[in-house]
Structures are given as structure tokens and as C-alpha cells.
Image (cartoon, helix red, strand yellow):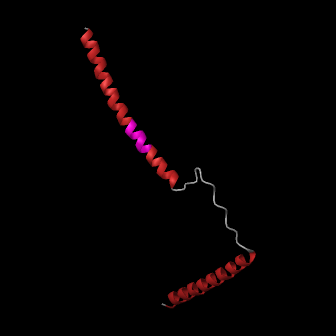
Amino acid sequence: MANTVSGVIEKALTKLRSEKSRIDRQISALETALGAIRSRGSQDGAAPRPRRRMSAEARRALAKRMKAYWAKRRVAAEAQTKKAKKR
């Protein structure tokens, strides 16, 4: 009976050691992946970049450009609908 018990224990130890080595490999792979993510400059530990501000003059210029852009689009859309109605 002593041989049976020791045999079972040795088999269990062998299985546990193989499982331990598999888990160690997985831990290593996860640590490598985590290191790669952190080195890319993710926001986890990095200081946030300061937000860029737009001056009032730049805002006015942008508003003027966008109004012209949408006016041009509106005229083009009206021309398309007039063409479609003529047909």
C-alpha cells in the first residue's frame, strides 16, 4: 500500500509541476503584453497632455470659413433639387 500512495502522490506532483510551468509561461506572456502596452505611452501612468486652446481670433476665422462652406453646400443642394424637379 505504501507504493500505491507514494505513486499517486508522485503522479499528482508531476501534474502540478507541469501545470505550474504552463501557468508561469502564461504569466510571463501577460507581463510582456502589459509592458508593451505601458511602453506605448498609454494614459495609465503617463501625464495627460495639456489641452490646446484656440484664440478668439482663430475661432472667428473658423466660424467664417464654416459659414462659407455650409452656404456653398446649401446652394449646391438647392441646385440639385431644382434639377431633379425639372425632370
Picture layout, residue 57 above or below residue 75: above
Whether residue 25 is in magenta: the answer is: yes
Residue 56 vertical placement versus 40 (above, below): below
Q: Nearer the viewer, residue 61 or 11?
A: 11
Q: Residue at x 56, y 89 (%)?
A: 79
Q: Position of residue 29 (x, y in %)?
A: 41, 44
Q: Is 55 left or right of 6, judged from the image as shown? A: right
Q: Residue at x 70, y 77 (%)?
A: 58
Residue closest to the far top: 1
Task: Tell me: 66 left or right of 30.
Answer: right
Percent x, y for residue 5?
Answer: 28, 13
Q: Quadrant of residue 7?
A: top left
Residue 43 screen position, x and y as percent = 58, 54
Q: Is residue 13 left or right of residue 72?
A: left
Q: Is residue 33 magenta?
A: no
Residue 3, placed above or below residue 11: above
Q: Nearer the viewer, residue 61 or 48?
A: 48
Q: Main secondary structure of the magenta part?
A: helix
Query: Magenta part of the protein: which range?
Result: 24-30
Image point (71%, 76%), residue name: 59
Q: Nearer the viewer, residue 80 or 86?
A: 80
